[in-house]
Image: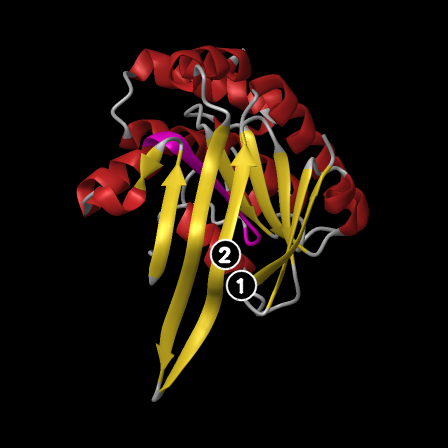
Amino acid sequence: MAIQAASEARAVAAVARSTVVRLQRVARTYRSGAVDVAALKGISLEIPSDRFSVVIGASGSGKTTLLNIIGAIDSPSAGTVEVCGQDLAQMGDDSISDFRARNIGFIFQTFSLVPVLSAYENVEYPLLLVGMPAAERRTRTLSMLEAVGLSAHAHRRPNELSGGQRQRVAIARALVKGPQLVLADEPTANLDSATGASIIELMRRVQEQSRTTFIFATHDAQLMSHADEVFAIRDGQLIEHRSGK
């Protein structure tokens, strides 16, 4: 099964690693017209491996900025960011892109699937980016679609799928390359409560089987109730950390 294979593929790199994300005094300031806006203000935190972690906070609190910095999409104005054992500040743009492609999966509120590609092709796409051979791509893609319950819909395009099915495709795409870390920004926000609950159960099951670390930004109380770690942010500052393990 793809999940088991991905876990085995990460085993050597994950040996002796207990912390997947480490932030030290991370700040991020944006320029808006003539005004500096502080999105993050000196956040320090550590997220252990094999965790289902949740970042909570009101809109504008800095949740998405924090995820973007952890995912190497954005850079901090100050502080240190270590992800999967790598100090991101020591890496050039090409190295960052390659690191992100191989080690981090993303799940978005709006699904962000390529509309002209089938479910199979959307899931396969990250494997094309890292140059995986065709036979292995096919095996991994089909196994991942089976894992999220979409084998029968492999050749359907996103507009032929329900919201829940599209999010399942997005989850399969995020996991197919066997990342050490998956970042999810409000992954249940566009789903009804019943579909959202089934997606949360799927992500939790996948996380437990693959031992991948998940980090969510969310307002969803259902998602919070499944969390191993909860980080509460307000006005760009970490105000609370609760651990469930």
Boundaries of the magenta span: 102-110
Task: Tell whether 219 sits left or right of 74.
Answer: right
Query: Measured along the vertical axis of the image, is residue 70 above or below residue 243?
Result: below
Image quadrant in which the N terminus is located: top right
Question: Which mark is in front, 1 or 2?
Answer: 2
Disc on the earlier residue, 1 or 2: 2
Q: How far apart are marks 1 and 2 (CA)?
A: 10 Å
Q: Is residue 76 visible?
A: no
Query: Pointer 2: what residue?
Result: 43
Colouring chosen for the image of the structure? secondary structure
Q: Is mark 2 on a helix, strand or loop?
A: strand
In contact (CB < 8 Å): disc 1 and disc 2: yes
Question: What residue is drawn where x is 22% and y is 42%?
Answer: 91
- Residue 109 drawn in magenta: yes
Query: Measured along the vertical axis of the image, is residue 14 above or below residue 103?
Result: above
Query: Measured along the vertical axis of the image, is residue 128 above or below residue 187?
Result: above
In the image, what residue type sits under mark 1?
Gly
Label ID, residue 62: 1
Residue 5: x and y in percent read 47, 11
Residue 68: x and y in percent read 43, 53
Question: What residue is drawn where x is 74% and y is 35%?
Answer: 244
Residue toward you, 194 or 64: 64
Residue toward you, 69 or 241: 241
